[in-house]
Image: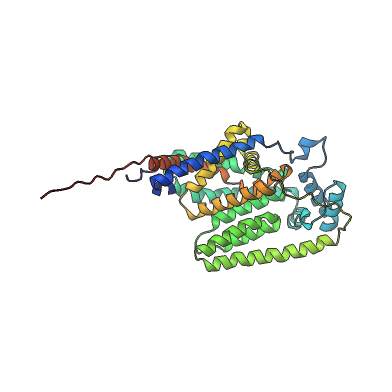
C-alpha cells in the first residue's frame, strides 16, 4: 500500500515509511509517552517567578536579577553586587555556578529600559519570522498555516513580557531557537554565533551546542563541527574566568547550594513547558497530553532540523527529570519559544502512523500450470 497523500503537510511524515510492525510498536510508544506526560499531574505547583505575585514571600529569582541589574547600573562591580544580593536574599553563593554569567546584567545595566524592551521585541519577532519562513513551505493548505501562527504565538508568549527581561532563560531561549532556525547545510556561522551568545547568557545552553556539534559531526559537516567546538572552547574559557572572579568575592563560610539532584522525573519537564506557554490556561491533564503530542509532532517532521530539535528536547527532558528542582522549573524556557509548533505535524503523523500499522497486505502466490 502506497503512502496516503499528505493531509496538512506538503510531504509525508517519517512515519509514512515505517513497516507495519514498527508502526504498531510506535503506537504503543506514543501511548506510553502520553501516559508519561500525565505524571505532571503529581508535580507540585512551583513558586511564581514574579515578585509581584509573591509579595508575602522571600525575594524571587527574578527580583534578585532585577536587583543585580540596578546595582550594576549605579556603578557597582557585577561580582560584588551579586554577592551582596545573594547574601541579602539568603541565597547560596557556592559553587560558582550560583552566580550567573555577567553579560546580560552588564548589558541591561548600560541600556535604558525602553531599549531593553525594543531589543526583546525585536529578537522575539525575528525568531518568529525566521521560524515561519522555515515552516510555511512544509504546510500545503491555509488552515495549517493559520494554525502554526497561532501555535507559535502561544509558544513565544512568555518571551515578549518586558518584566521578565532580567531573566536569563528568556534571552537564551530565543537565541537557541533563532540559531536552530538559521542553521542550514553549509551555512552555520550565524547559528554558531547565536549559540555562543546563548551560552554566555545561560550556561545550560551548552547542551544545545553539544547537540549541534554532534549532529554536524555525524552528518559529515566537519567545518561546522569544528565551529561548534570552537564556540564551546570559548565558553569554557569564559567559565574559567567567571569561576575565578566568583572566588574573589566568596569564602568558605558562605552557604552552599543544596544541589540540583531534584529527581522530579519527566512530569516536571512537561509541567515546565505548560507553564512556559499558553497551555497554562488549559486544565493540566489536557495541557500535558498536548505536550506529549507536540513531542510526537517534532519527531514526525521528516527534516534534519526536526531531529536536532527532538534531540535537544530529549536532552532537556533528561536534564530536568534528574536535576531540576520544583523552584527551577523555568529551565524549560530554553526550549519553549517554538515548542508548540510541533502540534501542527500531529494530524499527518497520527494518520500516517495508523495507516502503516493497519496495513495488512497479503502476498498472493498463483501457480500457473503448463
On the rendered structure, is 98 left or right of 270?
right
Q: Quadrant of residue 265?
A: top right
Residue 203 picture location, percent across and down: 70, 56
Front in this rendered view, residue 172 or 129? 172
Q: How is the image coloured?
A: rainbow
The residue positioned 40% from the left and 45% from the top of the image is 21
Whether residue 353 can be seen here: yes
Name the residue at the left extreme.
370
On the rendered structure, is 92 left or right of 25?
right
Quadrant containing the N terminus in the rendered view: top left
Whether residue 187 can be seen here: no
Front in this rendered view, residue 258 or 156? 258
Vertical comparison of 215 with 276: above or below: below
The residue positioned 53% from the left and 40% from the top of the image is 32
Residue 171 picture location, percent across and down: 67, 51
Name the residue at the top extreme.
283
Vertical comparison of 59 with 233: above or below: above
Vertical comparison of 40 with 184: above or below: above
Front in this rendered view, residue 159 or 244? 244
Q: How many marks?
A: 0
Residue 259 picture location, percent across and down: 76, 50
Residue 178 picture location, percent across and down: 59, 53
Amino acid at each position: 500500500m502506497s503512502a496516503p497523500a499528505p493531509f496538512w503537510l506538503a510531504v509525508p511524515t517519517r512515519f509514512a515509511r515505517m513497516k507495519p510492525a514498527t508502526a504498531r510498536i510506535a503506537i504503543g510508544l506514543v501511548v506510553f509517552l502520553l501516559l508519561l506526560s500525565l505524571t505532571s499531574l503529581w508535580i507540585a505547583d512551583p513558586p511564581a517567578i514574579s515578585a509581584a505575585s509573591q509579595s508575602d514571600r522571600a525575594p524571587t529569582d527574578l527580583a534578585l536579577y532585577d536587583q543585580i541589574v540596578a546595582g550594576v547600573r549605579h556603578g557597582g562591580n557585577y561580582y560584588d553586587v551579586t554577592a551582596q544580593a545573594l547574601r541579602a536574599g539568603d541565597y547560596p553563593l557556592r559553587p560558582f555556578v550560583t552566580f550567573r554569567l555577567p553579560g546580560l546584567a552588564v548589558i541591561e545595566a548600560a541600556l535604558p529600559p525602553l531599549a531593553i524592551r525594543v531589543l526583546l521585541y525585536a529578537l522575539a519577532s525575528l525568531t518568529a519570522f525566521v521560524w515561519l519562513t522555515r515552516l510555511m513551505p512544509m504546510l500545503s493548505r491555509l488552515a495549517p498555516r493559520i494554525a502554526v501562527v497561532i501555535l507559535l504565538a502561544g509558544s513565544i508568549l512568555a518571551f515578549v513580557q518586558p518584566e521578565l527581561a532580567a531573566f536569563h532563560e528568556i534571552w537564551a531561549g530565543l537565541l537557541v531557537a533563532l540559531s536552530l532556525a538559521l542553521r542550514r547545510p553549509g551555512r552555520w556561522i550565524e547559528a554558531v554565533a547565536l549559540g555562543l551568545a546563548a551560552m554566555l547568557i545561560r550556561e545550560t545552553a551548552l547542551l544545545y551546542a553539544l547537540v549541534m556539534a554532534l549532529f554536524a559531526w555525524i552528518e559529515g559537516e566537519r567545518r561546522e563541527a569544528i565551529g561548534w567546538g570552537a564556540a564551546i572552547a570559548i565558553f569554557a574559557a569564559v567559565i574559567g574566568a567567571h569561576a575565578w572572579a566568583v572566588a574573589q568575592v566568596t569564602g568558605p563560610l558562605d552557604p552552599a547550594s543544596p544541589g540540583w539532584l531534584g529527581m522530579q522525573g519527566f512530569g516536571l519537564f512537561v509541567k515546565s513547558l505548560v507553564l512556559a506557554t499558553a497551555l497554562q490556561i488549559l486544565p493540566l491533564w489536557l495541557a500535558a497530553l498536548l505536550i506529549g503530542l507536540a513531542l510526537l509532532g517534532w519527531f514526525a517532521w521528516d527534516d534534519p532540523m526536526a531531529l536536532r530539535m527532538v534531540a535537544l528536547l530529549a536532552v532537556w527532558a533528561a536534564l530536568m527529570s534528574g536535576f531540576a528542582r520544583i523552584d527551577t522549573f523555568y529551565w524549560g524556557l530554553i526550549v519553549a519559544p517554538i515548542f508548540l509548533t510541533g502540534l501542527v505535524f500531529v494530524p499527518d503523523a497520527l494518520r500516517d502512523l495508523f495507516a502503516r500499522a493497519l496495513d495488512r497486505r497479503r502476498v498472493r502466490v498463483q501457480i500457473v500450470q503448463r
